[in-house]
Structures are given as structure tokens and as C-alpha cells.
């Protein structure tokens, strides 16, 4: 996976993020878990996968 590729988070979560303009992993730092979880299709599992992918790159979601 490249530094900007989205991890495999499932189609519903991928579509939900795309609807708000997020198609790359590097667009997620600064977004909050609460904001992402409010999107229909994004659940705790997707957040865990995103957290892990960002942590591998020394980044994180907003508190």
C-alpha cells in the first residue's frame, strides 16, 4: 500500500468517505473519530483500521 492509498475498510465506509471528498489516507489526519463515525457506513472496525494505517505512518486522527 502506498502512503496515500486507503486501507481496506469495506465498501460502505469507502463510499461514505468518498462522498465527503476523502479518497486518500493522507486526507484523514485532522478529522475526528466522532466525525467519521457519524457517517453512515463508517463503524468502529473501519476506524480501527484507519487508526492502524495512520499510526504506521506516524500520524493520527484528531482527538
Image: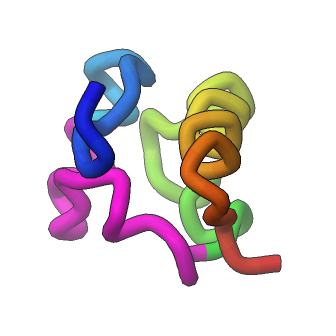
Q: Is residue 6 magenta?
A: no
Q: Is residue 2 left or right of residue 61?
A: left
Q: How is the image coloured?
A: rainbow
How far across and how far down the image is residue 58, in percent? Answer: 65, 59
- In the rendered view, would you say 1 is above or below 18? above
**Left or right of residue 45: residue 41:** left
- Tell me the magenta residue range: 15-31
Q: Residue at x 43, y 23 (%)?
A: 9
Residue in the foreground of this view, choosing between 63 and 26: 26
Q: Quadrant of the C terminus?
A: bottom right
Between 28 and 35, the residue placed more toward the observer is 28
Q: Which residue corresponds to the image point at 16% horizontal and 68% vertical from the top-left?
A: 21
Q: Quadrant of the N terminus?
A: top left
Q: Position of residue 44 (x, y in %)?
A: 73, 33
Which quarter of the picture shows residue 33? bottom right
In the picture, residue 28 is in which quadrant?
Answer: bottom left
Q: Where is residue 12 drawn, in percent x and y?
A: 32, 26
Picture coordinates of residue 62, whole percent (x, y): 71, 78
Q: Residue at x 25, y 50 (%)?
A: 4
Q: Nearer the viewer, residue 30 or 39?
A: 30
Residue 28 among those drawn in magenta? yes
Amino acid at each position: 500500500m502506498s502512503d496515500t492509498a486507503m486501507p481496506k475498510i469495506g465498501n460502505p465506509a469507502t463510499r461514505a468517505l468518498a462522498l465527503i471528498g476523502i479518497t486518500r489516507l493522507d486526507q484523514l489526519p485532522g478529522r475526528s473519530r466522532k466525525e467519521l463515525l457519524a457517517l453512515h457506513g463508517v463503524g468502529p472496525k473501519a476506524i480501527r483500521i484507519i487508526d492502524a494505517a495512520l499510526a504506521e505512518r506516524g500520524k493520527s486522527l484528531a482527538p
